[in-house]
Image (cartoon, rainbow, N blue to C red):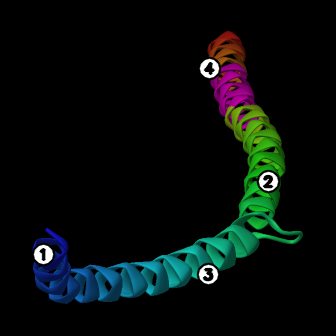
Amino acid sequence: MHDDILVKLNEMDSKLDTLLQWKAVHKESHKGINRDIVELRDTLFENPGLKSQVQTLMNCKHQTSRWRDFWVGVLKIVIATVIIAVLMWFMLLYQKEGSTNELQTSEMETFSEKGELK
């Protein structure tokens, strides 16, 4: 019986060596993974980490877009005002030309009436 146990232990010895080697390699690979995870966390979350830098950029973009929207609104108002002013100017010119034509017509009628009276 004692010999049977020794035979089984000798058979398991090679398998145990393989298992221990696999476990050692597995632990080493986990150390590398854990180190990479710690580096990534430091990069992402430590101050100033990537997350805080992205948040700063997003806040800056939000403020920039607010100012851009404000200036676009001002530009729209200025353009509308210029268009209305140009239209009013054209209408004023048209009205003056119409009244000038009426004056010229009435002057010619008056002149022709005076000419006929003589």
> Disc 4 designates what residue?
105
Say few, some or many: other residues with alpha carbon within 10 Å of mark 4 (under 14 / 14 to 19 / 20 or more).
few
Element under disc 1: helix
Give the distance between the C-alpha atoms of the residues marked 3 and 4, in whole angstroms: 98 Å
The three-letter amino acid code for the residue at tag 4 is: Thr
Judged by its main secondary structure, the magenta piece is helix
Horizontal side of residue 5 vs 26, given as left or right: left
Image: magenta residue range = 84-101
Tell which circle, 3 or 4, labels the residue nearer the N-terminal end: 3
Give the distance between the C-alpha atoms of the residues marked 1 and 3, in whole angstroms: 40 Å
Horizontal side of residue 16 vs 20, given as left or right: left
The three-letter amino acid code for the residue at tag 2 is: Thr
- Of tags 2 and 1, which is closer to the observer? 1
- Of tags 2 and 3, which is closer to the observer? 3
> Disc 2 designates what residue?
64
Q: Are marks 1 and 4 in contact (CB under 8 Å)?
A: no
Give the distance between the C-alpha atoms of the residues marked 2 and 3, in whole angstroms: 39 Å
